Image (cartoon, rainbow, N blue to C red):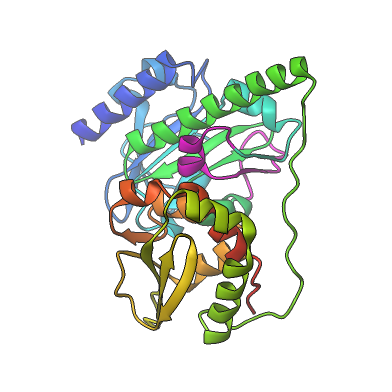
Amino acid sequence: MNKLKKEMIDIGKLLWDKDLASGLNGNISLRVDEESFLLTGRGTCLGRLEEKDIVQVDLEGNVIGKGVASSENLMHREIYKVFADTKAIIHTHLTYASGYFSVNEALVPVTFESRLYLGEIKAVEQTTPTVTDVSPVIESLRNNNIMMLKSHGSLAMGKNLFDCFLLTQCLEESVKMDAVSRIYQAQAGELKSEKIDQLTGAKKFKLFSREQIDEIVRLVNEDQKLSELGKNSQMTMGLAVKLDESGAAYSFQFEDGKIVDVLENDEAEFVVSAPEKVWRAVFAREIDPFVATTQKKMILKGDFAKISKWYAPCSRLFELWQKVEVE
């Protein structure tokens, strides 16, 4: 137990030193076992935590031993109930991110690296100083391990506290970079707004049906942009997609960005697998496939470093896939 508390103390100090926490704001938790977790106490400073400031709480909200748990007790325990694999949570009141989301609904990071880790961050409305309705938070976390509460702060969950810290730091830095890029764009008179391709609104297909796959192939092979990206990057590889529940799988054989064959198996250089709910989120544009992979919502078998060189054509590929709506 002392080891877990020390880990929380160290992360609190790191958040403080990196200007990701201030005053008496924010809270940290760490799962102890299936029935309880450690949570920072009410009115504590993350930068000056001591062991006595950390309280053990069960999943019903009861304190085990002494202390008064953070007022965000409800939010932490409900997340642990829903996401059994989650071991740690960081909630903090980020300065720049909170400011950004006070006037914006979403953020798409500027750099490739940040997009891989964060994807698109969407804000959830928050009308009370303490979260009393956890359901919107839960729904947001189903698609991304980090999210923002409007007028409140960020929340990150993960396998350990350092993973949560990295997501939190990446979000704050991404907002700073977005602000700086807008300044430069405005100075150059080139501030532009990007338009997201609209869904075709055509026929809807059964998930992982042969008809859906055939439509994907058609769109991919007719797309001039993907053709150019694939040819320039020499995107020749095998990429399989697999549905966990049924085991249904399709292996796409690419040659310079064109699909030349599709086999009904998962025998490919790269295999992406996920449960149905994740695939549906991907096709509904609720989650970026690259982000889902880095956050382990989707499992990638293969050399990630190698497939990363085809980031541009693969991104275009997934954009086209998302045009094929599912039932």
Relative to 23, say whether 279 is above or below: below
Residue 252 as seen in the image, left or right of residue 267 = right
Whether residue 139 appears in this view of the structure is: no
Q: Residue drawn 50% across and 80% down?
A: 208
The number of discs equals 0
Q: Quadrant of residue 14?
A: top left
Relative to 172, say whether 134 is above or below: below
Q: Could you say which is closer to the camera, residue 41 or residue 86?
A: 86
Residue 172 percent coordinates (x, y):
54, 26
Residue 5 percent coordinates (x, y):
27, 30
Q: The C terminus appears in which quarter of the rendering? A: bottom right
Q: Could you say which is closer to the camera, residue 155 or residue 33?
A: 155
Q: Residue drawn 32% across and 55% down?
A: 35
Query: Per the image, is 160 magenta?
Result: no
Q: Residue drawn 40% across and 46% down?
A: 309
Residue 318 as seen in the image, left or right of residue 53 = right
Q: Residue drawn 27% across and 46% down?
A: 32
Whether residue 200 appears in this view of the structure is: yes
The region drawn magenta spans 109-133
Q: The N terminus appears in which quarter of the rendering? A: top left
Relative to 98, say whether 81 is above or below: below
Q: Could you say which is closer to the camera, residue 190 or residue 168?
A: 190
Residue 277 percent coordinates (x, y):
51, 69
Relative to 270, say whether 308 is above or below: above
Query: Per the image, is 126 magenta?
Result: yes
Residue 277 as seen in the image, left or right of residue 269 = right
Residue at the far right in the pictured view: 189
